[in-house]
Image: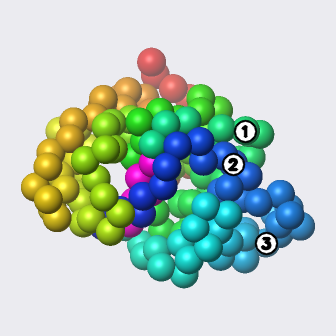
Amino acid sequence: MFKGKAFKFGDNISTDHIVPGRLAHLRSNLPELAKHVLEDADPTFAARVKPGDFVVVGSNFGLGSSREHAPLVIKMAGVSAILAKSVARIFFRNAINLGLPVLICDTNKIDDGDEIEVDMETGVVRDITNGNKIAFKPIPTFMSAILNEGGLISYIKKHGDFKL
């Protein structure tokens, strides 16, 4: 169960919004890069986000180039999960591989600043602020196993292989 504040963004937030190309020189200093996460979409986000909070977005989140750093710095900023109407396939896979849950659901009923709770077991987002409950498609078992280990590398180190 995750609980935190919703940081709401719109549609078509690209990997360049998440990790601006002008900051490519910081790729070898991820803690510093994380201080700039999503600054092109909201310059105040990195300073306001707290561990456990959520990125809540519209459609087509993470489009653009395959920047593995994009989901990684979101996770490093303390975000517990991304809730999206839809997400770019490569971003989704990178996020899971790095241990960051991406949940596909109707985000229209969540407002910026709402306190929300996510139950990965039941597949329900509960908006504590307004009382709405939103179902999301459960994450497949093998992906849940990767998330539970903190990412693909940790999973492989511990288990050696997948049992699909």
Q: Provide the residue span drawn in magenta.
A: 53-57
Please name whichever residue, 125 or 112, is drawn nearer the observer in this view of the structure.
112
- Residue 93 circle label: none
| 9 relative to 27, above or below | above
Q: Residue furthest left?
A: 131
Q: Earlier in the sequence, mark 3 or mark 1?
A: 3
Q: Amino acid at mark 3?
A: Asn
Q: Is residue 136 magenta?
A: no
Disc 1 target residue: 64
Q: Circle 2: is it few (<14), some (14-19), or many (20+) Cα within 10 Å?
A: many
| Quarter of the rendering containing residue 111 | bottom left
Instruction: Find residue 148 and report its horizontal and vertical position in percent.
Output: 40, 47
Q: At x 42% / y 58%, what residue is drawn? A: 8
- Image quadrant occupied by the C terminus: top left
Please name whichever residue, 38 or 12, is drawn nearer the observer in this view of the structure.
12
- Contact between marks 3 and 1 (CB within 8 A): the answer is no
Q: Residue furthest bottom?
A: 47
Please name whichever residue, 140 or 145, is drawn nearer the observer in this view of the structure.
140
Disc 1, SS: loop
Q: At x 42% / y 63%, what residue is drawn? A: 7
Disc 3 target residue: 29
Disc 2 target residue: 15
